[in-house]
Amino acid sequence: MPNSKFFNVPPMPDIGGYLPTQLNRLDSRNLVAGLTMASRIDNRFLYGLIAELPPLEFSSEILIAIARRAIYDATWYEVKSINHNFSYDRQAYYAVAKLFHQLADRDKLEALLELTGLLISAGDSQMEAGDEGMTRDEIEMFVNVTLDALEASSFTPEQLRETACALRCSAAGTFICHQRFEQLTGVN
């Protein structure tokens, strides 16, 4: 792109009212090809599709891989933005929520626990970097999906307590879902 110092960048027109009409004119093959291309070019586009459409029927392995990448994108921040409010990828967070629910519905508890630990670790770092802990509610929402799946599992009470304790250790110091972990583990 030309340097804006020497070139006045024209604004993008608002096409929100026109786009649905234009997309309705396309046959489904062209529409699918365009959506697939856009998803390959920009992860945020894929996250938007995942967040807004009914659950996409990917294999569990693909769901896990997309969730892992979405956690990375959702929790990424620029180091120079530490102790400031900074923007974060809300679409990636919404995609993670949908993917966590899909994994819970498929009883992929082991993968869900691993991804939740990753999210807690990366999210904790992101919360510490910002000056208001902006993403805490989103992170708690995902941890609660995992804890709900854990409670609904066939784990014995002892297995449930041990697993919750292990997950709580990854959240140590963050107070993420503090009361919920107290209930599950019996530890203050």
Image (cartoon, rainbow, N blue to C red):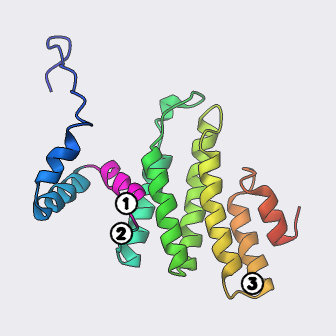
Q: Tell me the residue that label 3 is attached to.
A: 159
Q: Position of residue 64 (x, y in %)?
A: 43, 70
- C-alpha span from label 3 to label 2: 32 Å
Q: Tell me the residue that label 2 is attached to.
A: 56
Q: Position of residue 87 (x, y in %)?
A: 48, 34
Q: Earlier in the sequence, mark 3 or mark 2?
A: 2
Identify the mark at residue 53; answer none if there is no mark.
Answer: 1
Q: Is residue 40 above or below residue 90?
A: below
- C-alpha span from label 2 to label 1: 7 Å
Is 119 placed left or right of 10 in the picture? Answer: right
Name the front one of labels 2 and 1: 1
Mark 2: amino acid: Leu
Q: Where are the magenta residues, as a range?
A: 42-54
Q: Secondary structure at mark 1?
A: loop
Is 42 placed left or right of 53 in the picture? Answer: left
Residue contact at pointers 3 and 1, CB within 8 angstroms: no
